[in-house]
């Protein structure tokens, strides 16, 4: 009772009294600002509890920095703090975006902004993707900017990022962040009004128009509808508790297929992903168990799994003997790249020239498309990791009159054609279904066709995995050590093989270039070093742009006709093992391995 006057009196004085317990004036100021701005009682409560507990380290983690653009936009966990996703940081971000858009587009007040959302959320923070979308709309509507707000959850490819449709990349990302930092305090109470969109005449719903346009454009990727209509294959689809179910069903209908059989436990939205230990289909067998079990029970040979926002795709195929083959992103890219070129040639017989066609991949992905390009006459380019770089290059190539036929990143992100300059799990799912059905008419499986591709172009054996590390100083120490590994420079050998080339994108160094300057853009905010060995293996170590991971990639590209795959795999395994053990030192640095 004695505390009540202080609690109900000067709120700012009360906040300062509690915040002073951290002993860090800068941290105290940031938490003071938070408590004076945040109107969400649940995230305010999280901060108050941390202050009462004296959890200074956790408070620093949440308040010492802001979210930054990685390989896939602004990403962070949901929760309280300036470095997390929550009501306040989304309002701040939208305010900064509005400021920047106003500078770039004089007609912003008539053209408007598209806002979409998926099914994710966090009950403890009172956050859902839909609520955050509505707050985004509120900020824009408060400035009389028209908002095209989807009335229900949609796949990520339905929502464009810039006037080009591609994700925001440099220099826009840096300028947007600068504008966010200059617009931290919410402008008005209207910014917190999640119901404003329901009352504003400036809000429209683009769902019907965009869905219709998307499905119409999807027809351009359908090459064998007559075969699809009578295909004997059955498909199982898991939406991973996300947005994919209804849109994959519609896409199958466009291609002439009956609807795929849905995994009932994972069909409907569930922000807790209650049937999954990890809502990432890239994890393979361990997260596809329900899908594989259902497929076996209904005699389906192909499993398709879209991630929660339906921009990525995992595929599994039943092999003779009841074993399942879960394809890697690199293997699916070999199949999809072959398929898109095969159908282009069917529609464009000789003397059609493929030299104006492009395929793109990130620099940590398989080089199979590069090998195909050398033999088939189309062009291939690599970009930095992240589809924002692929999207940016796609726009540039399109503006120059070139056609991008296919693009991918090894983390199961694919784009067939050029519907949108971003990865798209919905279109990829139905394209894989059609490819499977076509191959079935030739008595071939996906696995057999993959083997045929490798026979023609040479086996491309790759390994991709990661180690968890949520301690930035450790990451910096690891990569600094690699840069001064031998006599103050990079390693000269790995597993007994001489290093013939080093490319360090973080510092802009490439030993293969005459001037030693990297041809890829320098990315000082992340770590990435690649090594090419004398035996042809290329290996890369990099920090993830979206998660607290150190990722490692390695690939062995054999000559066409070389059939001794087991020897290639063994050599690659050994090089990868030594690379990780000696350069990353997992035990010493307390790195956590990938779950089996």
Image (cartoon, rainbow, N blue to C red):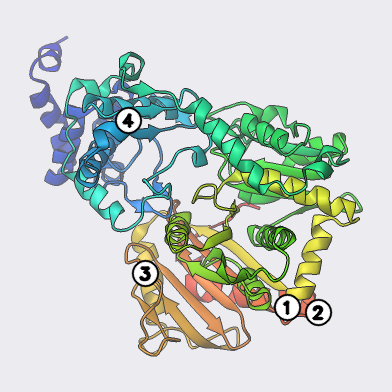
Q: Which residue is mark 2?
A: 564
> Considering the image in quadrants, where does the N terminus appear?
top left
Residue 568 marker: 1
Q: Identify the element where label 4 is drawn.
A: helix
- Please identify the quarter of the rendering in which residue 236 is found: top right
Q: Are marks 1 and 2 in contact (CB under 8 Å)?
A: yes
Q: CA distance from mark 1 to mark 2?
A: 7 Å
Q: Residue 419 at what x, y percent from top left?
A: 54, 47
Q: Are marks 2 and 3 in contact (CB under 8 Å)?
A: no
Q: Which residue is mark 4?
A: 136
Q: Residue 508 at what x, y percent from top left?
A: 35, 76
Residue 439 marker: none
Q: CA distance from mark 4 to mark 2?
A: 56 Å
Q: Identify the element where label 2 is drawn.
A: loop
Q: CA distance from mark 3 to mark 1?
A: 32 Å
Q: Earlier in the sequence, mark 4 or mark 2?
A: 4
């Amino acid at each position: 009772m004695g505390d009540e006057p202080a609690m109900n009196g000067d709120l700012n004085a009360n906040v300062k009294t509690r915040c002073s317990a951290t002993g860090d004036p800068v941290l105290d100021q940031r938490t003071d600002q938070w408590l004076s701005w945040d109107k969400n009682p649940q995230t305010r409560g999280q901060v108050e509890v941390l202050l009462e507990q004296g959890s200074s380290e956790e408070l620093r983690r949440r308040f010492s920095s802001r979210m930054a653009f990685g390989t896939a936009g602004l990403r962070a966990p949901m929760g309280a703090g300036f470095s997390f996703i929550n009501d306040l940081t989304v309002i701040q971000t939208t305010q900064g975006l509005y400021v920047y858009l106003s500078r770039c587009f004089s007609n912003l007040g008539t053209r408007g902004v598209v806002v979409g959302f998926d099914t994710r959320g966090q009950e403890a923070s009172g956050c859902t993707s839909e609520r955050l979308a509505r707050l985004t709309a509120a900020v824009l509507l408060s400035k009389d900017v028209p908002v095209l707000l989807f009335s229900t959850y949609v796949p990520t490819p339905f929502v464009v990022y810039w006037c080009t449709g591609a994700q925001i990349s440099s220099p826009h990302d840096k300028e947007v962040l600068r504008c966010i930092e200059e617009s931290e305090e919410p402008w008005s109470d209207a910014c917190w009004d999640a119901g404003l969109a329901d009352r504003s005449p400036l809000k429209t719903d683009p769902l019907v128009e965009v869905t219709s346009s998307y499905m119409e454009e999807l027809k351009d990727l359908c090459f064998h509808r007559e075969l699809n209509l009578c295909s004997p294959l059955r498909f199982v689809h898991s939406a991973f508790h996300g947005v994919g179910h209804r849109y994959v069903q519609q896409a199958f209908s466009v291609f002439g297929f009956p609807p795929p059989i849905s995994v009932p436990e994972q069909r409907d939205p569930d922000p807790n992903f209650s049937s999954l230990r990890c809502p990432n289909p890239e994890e393979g067998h361990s997260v596809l168990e329900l899908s594989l079990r259902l497929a076996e029970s209904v005699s389906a040979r192909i499993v398709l799994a879209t991630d929660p926002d339906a921009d990525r795709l995992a595929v599994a195929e039943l092999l003779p003997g009841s074993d399942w083959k879960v394809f890697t992103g690199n293997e699916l890219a070999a199949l999809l790249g072959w398929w898109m070129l095969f159908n282009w040639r069917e529609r464009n017989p000789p003397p059609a020239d493929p030299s104006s066609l492009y395929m793109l991949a990130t620099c940590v992905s398989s080089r199979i498309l590069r090998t195909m390009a050398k033999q088939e006459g189309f062009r291939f380019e690599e970009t930095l990791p992240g589809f924002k770089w692929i999207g940016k290059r796609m726009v540039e190539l399109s503006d120059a009159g070139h056609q991008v036929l296919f693009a991918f990143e090894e983390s199961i992100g694919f784009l067939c054609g050029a519907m949108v300059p971003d990865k798209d799990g919905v279109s990829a799912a139905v394209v894989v279904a059609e490819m499977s059905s076509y191959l079935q008419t030739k008595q071939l499986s996906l696995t057999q066709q993959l083997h045929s591709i490798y026979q023609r172009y040479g086996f491309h054996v790759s390994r991709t995995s990661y180690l968890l590390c949520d301690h930035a100083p450790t990451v910096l120490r690891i990569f600094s050590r690699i840069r001064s590994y031998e006599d103050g420079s990079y390693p000269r050998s790995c597993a007994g093989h001489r290093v013939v080339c080093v490319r360090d994108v973080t510092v802009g160094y490439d030993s293969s270039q005459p001037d030693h300057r990297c041809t890829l853009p320098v990315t000082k905010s992340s770590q990435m070093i690649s090594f090419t060995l004398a035996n042809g293996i290329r290996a890369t170590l990099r920090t993830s742009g979206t998660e607290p991971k150190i990722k490692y990639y390695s690939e062995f590209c054999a000559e066409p006709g070389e059939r001794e795959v087991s020897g290639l795999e063994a050599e690659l395994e050994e090089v990868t093992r030594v690379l990780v053990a000696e350069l990353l030192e997992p035990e010493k640095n307390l790195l956590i391995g990938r779950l089996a």
